Image (spheres, grey):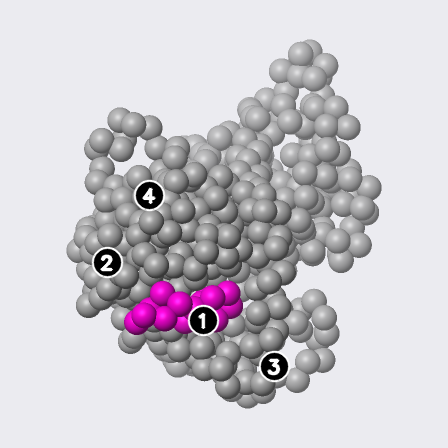
Amino acid sequence: MFNVPTLIYDGSCGFCKRCISYFQRFQRRHINYITSEKAQYLMDTPAKKDMDASVYFYHEGIFFKGAEAIFELYAVGAKKTHWKWMYNKIGGLKFLAELGYFCVAKNRKWLSKISQVLYGKFEKESGGIDRLHSRVFANSKETWFSEDVVYQNRIETYVIAQSLFFRGMGLVYLLAFGSLFFQVIGLFGSHGILPISTYAERIISVSKELSFPSIFLFFNSDTFLITATVMGVISGGLMIVGLLPGITSFVSWVLYLSFVTVGQEFMSYQWDVLLLEAGFLLLFFVPWGGSIFNQPTKKPSRLILFMLKLLLFRLMFTAGVVKLISGDNTWKTFMSLDYHFYTQPLPHFMSWYAHQLPLYIKKIGVGFAFFVELVVPFLFFMPRRPRHLAFLLTTLFMIFIMATGNYGFFNILVIVLSFILLDDYFILSRIPKWVKKMIDLRYRVVPERKVRKYLNRGIVCCLLVPMLYMESSRFITDRLIVPKPVQFLGGVAQHFRLFSPYGLFAVMTTKRKEVVIQASLDGETWKDYEFKWKPGAVNIAPKWAFPHQPRLDWQLWFSALSTIENNSWMYHYFVKLIQGSESVLSLMGPSPFGNKKPNYIQAQLYDYTFTELDDMKGTGYWWKRTYVGPYSPTLQLSK
């Protein structure tokens, strides 16, 4: 007889191996796993036909069979005794458990086939299962993994996926802060469009600092703003190489939160909040010391992993739902892509070519978008293979968006979020051999400490409760009575950008209104300001800005959707143009009067559409534009 607890199972049953692999996630004590074929030669056991029909667990000289063996295995191997207690103490549960086990055991061949479809093939031999815990001892809580064990057993670990997600977030932070570096003084500097220093004075005089969590309330000089973006770039770079994961994640999140809090119109896009929400969850997903891939590696929290999947689900699914409930006719008739490519905020030259595609291809594209947004998100919570499919479809969708429009770091952020759908086996099986030789794929996973486990549970509760109430009031009823504690949690979450409603392009714009800003020295001769990225002269091709996000150009697109009275920031912008602010002019193209300051400023509204293929061949123009009317009155600095 063995002197350690031993599980005897049918070695030809793939479903049995899958269940053992799942149990090993929770194992806290050394368990010996042998097949029924081997067991009959090693010990005095029940008949082989009985062992083939049911799992057996041997412990302290006693054989346990069927459902009782499973509960005993959990009590001994995982130290989860509550299932065994319920099995023995609650009347009727023993009968139901054994009946359920009998049904599963009788149909395990079909279950093996289903599990193979959902999870992939399992190894034929049991060596991998035996080796998996060959280095796990009774007094140890560490689990060793290596490439061959993960590969053979399809174990769903997320250590490599955790590393990829962390490094990917570092790339997103680097791109976000790098883009801000070139705009921060023109947008928020002392001579910028909306100076943070002025805004901070207003906030401090009328509100509590906790409602506006930003270091720029106290430090807002131009030098400090530049320094903050540089620190963000450096922090993102350190995340990419995997150094100091906890500290760099926290620094990046705090700096970006500070910008979003006081950035007003220019930092109010959905992906800004998406980055903060993902960045906050990242703080509880990665280890806080050393390197992201040093041994020992903290086991990624399943709760935080679920919250990241839920975040991705909310982003994608609500994007589809808002299109359906908006009642917009272009989405109903699948005609939206016939307008989208030229009406989107910042098209590039590939958008023009996409606009020339036949209408039926555009309708197929709309159908694909609905499928990815309304169906694929449910695959995020399913077993391995459906999740992998969801990753591929979501990534493909983001690549299509990148190929036809300028959306800054948004598409990369969604792809990085999708990394959490991949387990280590999927990644290991696709890493080239030359890459495997460069990195150490043998690592050990140390379970979470109790303090961190309970902290994660508290964070999840504090986020889920207000999130459920807010989403319910958004889609179900706006008369939902929200308890005061939930209102408080919701307020804190909103102040720190820990939760936000999502839903892009609920209503498709069918016309592109473009604000054209003009300047004059005498009030009679007017010249247009040209921009680096947004449409202007009709003979200039739309420009590729990715991954940079020119926020002034973007905000002017939103301004064109309403009147100047609803965009008071534009008056500040016009003042800076008349004053000849160099920092603001650096955000634009060449000044129409060179070094001379204009005396008059006005804005006109034009209707822009893409030219057709024949028009392009004849004229070389990318755009057609029609004058709509004045957008603003003529302004002088004295007035």
Q: What stretch of residues is rendered in magenta?
A: 58-73
Task: Tell me the number on the disc at residue 92.
Answer: 3
Task: Tell me the number on the disc at residue 71.
Answer: 1
| Residue type (three-letter) at the residue carrying disc 3 | Gly
**Residue, disc 4:** 127
Front-most of residues 318 and 208? 318
Q: Give the mark nearest the N terminus, 3 or 4.
A: 3
Whether 183 is among the magenta residues is no
Answer with the quarter of the image where residue 2 lies: bottom left
| Residue type (three-letter) at the residue carrying disc 4 | Gly
| Residue shown at 62% from the left, 47% from the top | 110
**Residue, disc 2:** 136
Instruction: Where is residue 636? Give x, y as percent.
Output: 53, 52
Q: CA distance from mark 1 to mark 3?
A: 15 Å
Disc 2 is placed on an element classified as: loop
| Residue shown at 44% from the left, 46% from the top | 11
Q: Quadrant of the N terminus?
A: bottom left
Disc 1 is placed on an element classified as: helix
Front-most of residues 142 and 19? 19
Disc 4 is placed on an element classified as: helix
Q: CA distance from mark 2 to mark 4?
A: 15 Å
